Image (cartoon, rainbow, N blue to C red):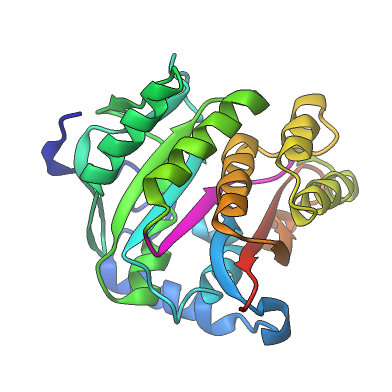
Amino acid sequence: MDFLPEARPSPIAGTWYAGDPHTLAHQMDAFLAAVKLKQEDLTGKVVGLVVPHAGHRYSGLTAAYAYKSVADSPRDLVVILSPMHQYYPEDFITSAFGAYQTPLGRVELAMPELRILDEQLARRGYKLVQVGADQEHSLEIQLPFLQQAWQKPFRLMPVMLRVRDSRKVEQFAAALYETIREYDCLIIASSDLSHFFPLEEAQTLDGETLRRISRFDPEAVLAGDSDGSAPACGAGAIAAMLEATQRMGAQKVQILNYSSSADSTGDDSSVVGYGSAAVLIPES
């Protein structure tokens, strides 16, 4: 795999989130300051997160619940798994650029680890494909929270998944685990929940999705998205994160927050659901 030396220019700064660095930093600080977590819910080490990916005005507060849980424990290596909302004829996709750019600065890709992941996937009959002109928002929109919460560099493994097949997801998670098993790593699954249902129906559907996540059941997450009983646009990312963190020794998923677009728009006729969760390895 070869990476371009320049950073991927942001296609969403100034629209999905603030384009001015001072405004963006202030907003990230405000979101994080507004969150109060129960420490008894977070006994252990957080190694995985589920985080929504709408524009910050819609889902920023719910996202902040996830990032508050790791605000005091920066990692050198971060894996962000997301869907890819545009059509692309591959299952596992990463950037062709050597970094992501946000208004808060440059985030370097973990290029050696991405090459190892590609090798691990190849052993299983798959490949990690690079794309140079993606417009995907769901991965990039997570970065300012980490940049502002940690105030120190971290290396990024970005992977966009276009799979819902449980066998492929399990094989990807196994390849990812073999790649990062020796690292102090955080794995983030970027996903919104149901889309465009009336609020009451959305809450029922999203409650079921969150229950499946909280049961640490990746196959049930994929099945619920497939049959519509528990939809999540990043079901593949969530399932892969759960599979990989189970291999890391995680045993508990704590749901941290739930909201919907109605909380910011006031329109409950057609909403998008947002949930955040932390995945924990128990204290030894």
Q: Is 96 drawn above or below residue 77 in the view shown?
A: above
Depth order, front residue of 283/153? 283
**Residue 142 magenta-drawn?**
no
Seen in the image, is 235 located left or right of residue 206? left
Q: Is residue 222 visible?
A: yes
As drawn, the residue found furthest toward the front would be 284
Depth order, front residue of 111/90? 111
The residue under the point 26% across, 36% down is 115
**Residue 192 magenta-drawn?**
yes
Q: Is 107 drawn above or below residue 83 in the view shown?
A: below
x, y percent for residue 10: 28, 45
Query: Residue 134 sits in which quadrant?
Result: top left
The residue under the point 37% across, 60% down is 183
x, y percent for residue 64: 55, 69
Q: Which residues are magenta?
A: 183-194
Depth order, front residue of 244/19? 244
Seen in the image, is 194 located left or right of residue 247? right
x, y percent for residue 200: 90, 50
x, y percent for residue 14: 34, 53
Q: Is 179 drawn above or below residue 38 in the view shown?
A: above
The residue under the point 33% across, 30% down is 118
Q: Is 114 drawn above or below residue 69 in the view shown?
A: above
Depth order, front residue of 175/87? 175
As drawn, the residue found furthest toward the left would be 5
Which quarter of the figure is the C terminus placed in? bottom right
The residue under the point 30% across, 37% down is 116
